[in-house]
Amino acid sequence: MKKPSLSTIFFSIFIILMIVPQTRMPIQEGISKIRVALFSPSALDEDQQTQLEPFTYRLIALDGTPADVEIGKGKVTFISYWATWCPPCRAELPSIQELYTDYGQMVDFVLITNENPDVIRKFLNKKQFTLPVVLPQMETPAALLERTIPTNYVIDKTGKVVIKEQGATDWSSDKIRETLNLLIGA
């Protein structure tokens, strides 16, 4: 009988670790962090930017208070659809937190999830995130509806989708900051 090669042994161990739930999440999150380190979103080409009709996104904060956000009514908006159980979402949240820390007063940040508020609060506390996480109180607008998380949008003051990005990415990059500075007029 042939002795297995070292690469076969490592591959087998990797497969086993991906099957076990306790090790799968950290491995997937680590792989997603590599993507975050390598990719930063760019503004869409002008012909790919979608113009939304101004609307009020009906939302509720984790404490149960209304947290409605006006989209396309004079303020730049960052929308993120995410979940605590999603490894790519977890991988990009530190960069979103950095961006929120620096731009939270100038940009409406809206991190939308459908999870249990207790689960979300526990996750945010553990990671020491201060992000404005909200729960939707209406159907997702058709122009923002995607089946993939994370899906993130940067929407300008008039409601134009300037950036749309699916998958983990670096939201605290110089490229994103330059785009936000242009959009807010800084």
Image (cartoon, rainbow, N blue to C red):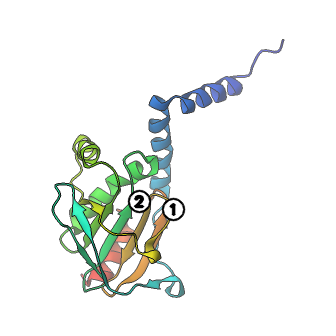
Q: Is residue 71 above or below residue 112?
A: below
Tell me which amino acid carries mark 2. Asp
**Relative height, residue 76 to residue 99 (above, below):** below
Q: Looking at the picture, does residue 24 appear above or below residue 12? A: below
The crowding category of the residue bearing disc 2, from other C-alpha atoms within 10 Å (few below 14, some 14 to 19, many at least 20), is: many
User: For the point 67% across and 23% down, which residue is it?
Assistant: 9
Q: Quadrant of the C terminus?
A: bottom left
183 relative to 15, above or below = below
User: Which mark identifies residue 170?
Assistant: 2
Which of the two discs, 2 and 1, labels the residue nearer the N terminus? 1
For mark 1, what is the residue? 147
Q: Residues within 10 Å of mark 1 (few under 14, many from 20)?
A: few
Q: Secondary structure at mark 1?
A: loop
Horizontal side of residue 144 vs 69, given as left or right: right
Q: How many marks?
A: 2
Left/right of residue 109 with respect to residue 175 in the rendered view: left
The amino acid beneath tag 1 is: Arg
Q: Quadrant of residue 123?
A: top left
